[in-house]
């Protein structure tokens, strides 16, 4: 691996943080082009090793990949700088957007812009279902796992963590019964497994990460108590950082279920708008949680100024979500070669990926119902929990913009930013007409 000056790496990580649009796929492709192809700082093999490891972890894989590559280049400080710069520009923009939303969200042009963006989001999520499905569902059994996951979360409200655990269990069984379906072939060109790190290193990383992550949460519980918006945010997003496997789109299904239906922090339409706004900013798509955290705290400020409360909520939500991402990388990076070719973990990942397709399909259907219909009801009976739209509330403008966005993205492969811009303009036109 080529020795890289820290200052050069710093400039590249800042550039990636500023232009990393397009979700995980675009961000991973950007890192590959800048780091592997153009500069040759690490080999193709090392890059893929890192990516495979990050896909096993909860949380945003692209941010964790940046942290891991930064660690490979410059150890701990390299990983911290790479991971932070990957998040920071998007975080600043999401806070500014959330602030503008609460200040100007009632203006017609702002409402139209958000309306157009949420219509485009529907096309983006549908495109994600198609892309992930084409790669992950290569056998009828995997199609079956995806179908079970979709029915479980959409029709019966099965929690996302249980779906992931169930899929992992099926993968482990499949590794023994049908290894040709669930197991990936070993990479004969892989480098030898690294030596295990010293126990003192592992202990230092574990204690440091636990303190940075857990102490703020504990302080909030002891001082403000459970039920305060800051405490609820710290506990919820900390749990989300542990249980949310499967990438940003899968995480959003779990976040939406909790933030909208359990805590009531946002209305369903606002969650869709937040995702649309996150698509227009650099950094991980999961930074929509910054927007969620801001609005939740802004609306329950207590004795604080609403703007200050919103800023604290946004910062707190982002902190407890991303600190664990650094912890997973610094703890697991020395073992990457050992983990990468483990047949059981490989099979579990295969099944989890299939289940994630079903979860993303549920997310796309949830978005479609709330974008295309003004009135959506929840029907419960016979053990089912179904979301049912009122056919008479169909929004023809949303249908038109969403269909056009799907054609542009999926059929004609027009760039994401161009589609978002066009949909935003169309939304403003409909709002002001």
Image (cartoon, helix red, strand yellow):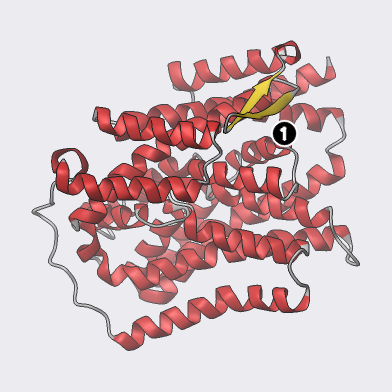
Percent across and percent down for residue 379 are 67, 27
Horizontal arrangement in the rendering, residue 121 relative to residue 297 (left or right) = left
Left or right: where does residue 139 sit relative to residue 228?
left
Q: Do we see residue 297 in this rendering?
A: yes
Residue appearing at x 78%, y 64% in the figure: 228
Q: Is residue 396 above or below residue 32?
A: above
x, y percent for residue 232: 70, 62
Which residue in the protein does label 1 denote? 269
Residue at (40, 33) in percent of width and height: 148
Residue furthest out toward the front: 382
Tell whether 345 sits left or right of 103: left
| Depth check, front residue: 170 or 3 | 170
Q: Nearer the viewer, residue 198 or 412?
A: 198
Residue 108, image x and y in percent?
Answer: 85, 28
Q: What residue do we see at 70% from left, 23% from top?
A: 425
Q: Dot 1: what SS?
A: helix
Q: Is there any visible trace of residue 120 in the rendered image?
A: no
Quarter that holds the C terminus: top right
Q: Quadrant of residue 231?
A: bottom right
Which residue is situated farthest in the left direction here? 188
* x and y percentages locating residue 94 in the rendered image: 67, 50
The residue drawn where x is 54% and y is 29% is: 364
């Amino acid at each position: 691996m080529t020795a890289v000056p820290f200052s050069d790496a710093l400039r590249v990580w800042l550039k990636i943080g500023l232009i990393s649009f397009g979700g995980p796929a675009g961000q991973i492709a950007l890192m590959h082009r800048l780091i592997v192809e153009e500069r040759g700082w690490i080999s193709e093999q090392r890059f893929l090793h890192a990516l495979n490891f990050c896909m096993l972890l909860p949380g945003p894989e692209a941010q964790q990949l940046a942290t891991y590559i930064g660690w490979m280049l410059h150890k701990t400080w390299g990983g911290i700088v790479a991971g932070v710069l990957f998040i920071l520009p998007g975080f600043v923009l999401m806070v500014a957007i959330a602030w503008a939303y609460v200040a100007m969200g009632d203006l017609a042009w702002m409402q139209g812009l958000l309306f157009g963006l949420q219509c485009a989001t529907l096309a983006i999520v549908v495109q994600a279902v198609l892309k992930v499905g084409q790669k992950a569902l290569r056998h009828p059994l995997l199609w079956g796992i995806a179908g079970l996951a979709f029915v479980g979360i959409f029709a019966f409200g099965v929690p996302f963590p249980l779906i992931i655990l169930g899929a992992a269990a099926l993968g482990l069984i499949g590794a023994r019964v049908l290894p040709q379906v669930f197991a990936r072939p070993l990479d004969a060109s892989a480098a030898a497994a690294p030596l295990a790190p010293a126990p003192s290193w592992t202990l230092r990383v574990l204690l440091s990460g636990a303190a940075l992550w857990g102490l703020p949460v504990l302080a909030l519980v002891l001082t403000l108590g459970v039920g305060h918006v800051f405490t609820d945010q710290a506990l919820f997003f900390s749990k989300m950082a542990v249980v949310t496997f499967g990438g940003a789109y899968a995480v959003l299904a779990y976040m939406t279920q909790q933030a909208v239906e359990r805590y009531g922090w946002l209305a369903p339409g606002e969650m869709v708008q937040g995702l649309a706004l996150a698509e227009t900013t650099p950094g991980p798509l999961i930074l929509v949680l910054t927007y969620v955290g801001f609005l939740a705290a802004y609306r329950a400020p207590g004795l604080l100024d609403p703007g200050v409360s919103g800023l604290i909520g946004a910062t707190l939500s982002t902190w407890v979500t991303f600190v664990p991402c650094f912890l997973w990388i610094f703890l697991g990076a020395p073992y990457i070669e050992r983990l990468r070719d483990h047949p059981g973990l490989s099979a579990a990942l295969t099944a989890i990926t299939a289940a994630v397709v079903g979860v993303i399909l549920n997310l796309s259907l949830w978005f479609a119902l709330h974008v295309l219909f003004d009135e959506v009801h929840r029907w419960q009976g016979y053990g089912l929990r179904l979301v049912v739209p009122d056919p008479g509330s169909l929004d023809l403008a949303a249908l038109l913009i969403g269909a056009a966005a799907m054609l542009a993205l999926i059929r004609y492969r027009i760039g994401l930013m161009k589609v978002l811009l066009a949909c935003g303009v169309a939304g403003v036109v409909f709002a002001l007409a």
